[in-house]
Image: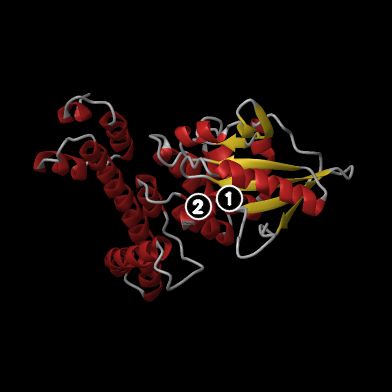
Amino acid sequence: MVTSHHEASHRIFQERPELLSPVFDLLGLPLPEQAVIEVLTPDVTEIRPLERRVDSVLRISGAGGDSFLLAIEAQMRPDYDKAVSWAYYLSYLKAKYDCSALLLVVCQDKRTADWAAGPFRLGLRDWPALTVHPLVVGPGNIPVVLDTDEASANLAMAAFSAMTHGRSREAPAILDALAVALGHAGEATFDYYAEMLEIGLGETHAREVWRGLMTKRSFFPGRGTLVEEMLLKGEAQGLEKGLEQGLEQGLEKGRAEGLQDGLQEGLQQGRAEGFRQGQLAERARSVAEVLKGRGFPTSFDTAERLLKCTDLDTLDRWYARAWTVARVEDVFGD
C-alpha cells in the first residue's frame, strides 16, 4: 500500500531536483553539466486492466543534448516480486521515449538497501535473459548532516538525510541542525520542509522529535498537522506568560508607550520560553522512550529527574547514554 511516508521519499526529487546532483555524486555518476530536470508521467500502463505506475520519472538533459530517464522507486522493505516490475518499467520507458533509462531505489534501512542493490537476473538459472542493476541510496551512502551551515547550504540534502536516517540514533541531532537552518529560510521554504519531514519520517520517534521542533504557521490550516497544533498551543502559552511579564514591565514604566512596549517584549519572551520548555520536555521524553524500548521501566524518580533538568546539552548527553547503559542510573553518571 502506498503511504504518505512512501510518497515523500520519492516526491522530494520531483519538487527539489537540486538534490539529484549530490546524490549522483555519492553514487559515482556525476550528472551532465548544466543538467535540466523534467518531471514526466509515472504511468507505464500499456494494456488495462493491468495498471503499472513508477513512483517518479524524471528526464535529465545535459547542455550537449544528451539525456537519460531516471525512474525513482521508494522501497520500504524487500519485495522479491519487484525485479519483474522494475525490468518492465525500464524496458517500457526506453521503448516509449527512445531514451536510456536508469532506476534509482530509495531505502531507509540497510537490509532493504542491501537487497535492492541486486543484481536481479531474469530468465533461466544458467542463462539469464535480462539483468536489472538498480542504483540505491540509503543509510549506508547518504551522509549524516549535523552541521547547521552544511544544512543551510543544501536544505534538500539535509532533509533527505533526515528522512534516510530517521531510524538511527543520529536522527534528533540531524533534525536539530535542519530546524536551525530552516530558521534562516523564507516562510514558504520553512513550511514546505516542516510538513515534508513530518510525512517523510513516517511512524518513527524522529517524527515526534521533528513535531516538537516546528512552531511556525502552516500553509494548510485545518489539516491538523503538528505545525498547526504546535503553533496554536505555543501561542496560547506564550501569550499568557507574555502578557503577565509585559504587564508587569509596562506598569513599571508607568506610561502608555511603556505598557505597549512591555507587552510586546513580554510576549516575545514568553514565546521563546515556551519553545525552550517544549524542547526540554521533548528531550526528556526521548530519553524515557529509549530506556522503555530497551526494557527499562521509567520510575517516578527517573521521570522526575528528567523533567527537572533545564539544560539541553545535559539531556542530549543522557539521550546518547540511554542507548548503551546497563543500568538506568548509569544514564545520569558524571
In percent of width and height, residue 239 lies at 33, 67
Q: Amino acid at mark 1?
A: His
Seen at 53% across and 55% down, the residue is: 7
Residue, disc 2? 6
The residue lying toward the viewer, choosing from 100 and 148, is 100
CA distance for labels 1 and 2:
7 Å
> In the picture, residue 301 is in which quadrant?
top left
Structure colour scheme: secondary structure
- At mark 2, the secondary structure is helix
- Bin the neighbour count of mark 1 within 10 Å (Cα to Cα): few under 14, some 14-19, many 20 and up: many
- Bin the neighbour count of mark 2 within 10 Å (Cα to Cα): few under 14, some 14-19, many 20 and up: many
- At mark 1, the secondary structure is helix
Q: Is residue 155 left or right of residue 326?
A: right
Which disc number belongs to residue 80?
none
Seen at 22% across and 36% down, the residue is: 291
Please say if 294 is above or below 159. Answer: above
In percent of width and height, residue 54 lies at 62, 53
Q: Is residue 107 left or right of residue 95?
A: left
- Tags 1 and 2 in contact by the CB under 8 Å rule? yes
In percent of width and height, residue 238 lies at 33, 63
Which disc number belongs to residue 10?
1
Furthest toward the right, the residue is: 64
Please say if 330 is above or below 222. Answer: above
Q: Is residue 269 left or right of residue 332?
A: right
Q: Amino acid at mark 2?
A: His
Furthest toward the left, the residue is: 300
